[in-house]
Image (tube, rainbow, N blue to C red):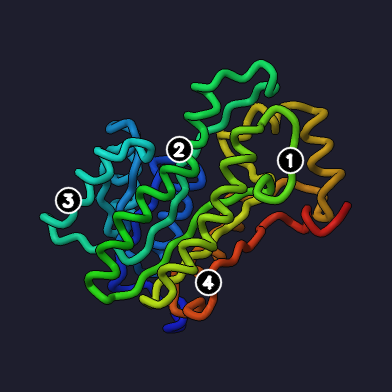
Amino acid sequence: MHKLFDLSGKTALITGSSRGLGFAYAQGLASAGASVVLNGTHHETLQTAIETLTSQGYHATGYVFDVANETQIIDVFKQMDQAGVTIDIVVNNAGIQHRQPMVELELKDWQRVLDVHLTGTFLVSREAAKRMIKRQSGGKFINICSLTSEQARPTVAPYTAAKGGVKMLTKSMSAEWAQYHIQANAIGPGYILTDMNEALINDHAFDTWVKNSNPTKRWGKTEELIGTAIFLAAPASDYINGQVIYVDGGWLAVL
């Protein structure tokens, strides 16, 4: 592997990584040489993911915590400190969706989506950055944005607001932490074949809309996000900061 893309000796924390895109990011970074720290909210699912990566020859551990719970996050970082685990790369992937017209949307549902996507990204990044700055070791943050960081669709207002916020939080992280050789960038996936999108994939009208509105005329594949994640985690991106790379098949490029 070319040294520009070699993650050997680095440790990456990937939130929401017990399945789906988060697991794919973890697997991809591990394949580039990183030790990976997985996260989820269910012990059994998390343990299965860890065992899968371990069986493939990768070094994987994990912690159960809710990214929207500040106390849990602080506790986990203290546990990692005590265990000698130093985080070099953070992928803020944990996310949820809540589909409902805004006029019917309850505050608790709005708040939960923002807490997981936006506040969770802030909390995890804050704790990791404190330690990177103290160690003077540099670091990489990869936040997960969305097409809705740029454009809106009906019934997903909390998600759209949160992902727009993640885009600007990424820029703020860059503005404050670049001086410490820390890069903060984001990936904006397009419409990807994942469990989270299963209902949309099985909706004939929506499936047709995705294919007709995208220059590639298809959904994206999970593995098509991995190269961007490795690039943003690796030395190859050391002078890239505060950017969002949209992996969307050209969806945002057309009207």
Mark 3 vs 1, N-terminal side: 3
Q: CA distance from mark 3 to mark 2?
A: 21 Å
Q: CA distance from mark 4 to mark 1?
A: 25 Å
**Is residue 198 shown above or below 105?**
below
Q: Position of residue 104 (x, y in %)?
A: 66, 16
Say if residue 47 shows up in the picture.
Answer: no
Query: The residue under label 3 is which amino acid type?
Result: Lys
User: Residue reaching furthest left?
Assistant: 82
Which residue is label 4 attached to? 241
Which residue is label 2 attached to? 116
Q: Considering the numbered disc 1 on the image, is that residue within a helix, a strand or a loop?
A: loop
Q: Considering the numbered disc 3 on the image, is that residue within a helix, a strand or a loop?
A: helix
Q: Residue at x 80, y 54 (%)?
A: 216
Q: CA distance from mark 3 to mark 1?
A: 38 Å
Which residue is label 3 attached to? 78
Mark 4 vs 1, N-terminal side: 1
Mark 3 vs 2, N-terminal side: 3
Q: Residue at x 43, y 62 (%)?
A: 141
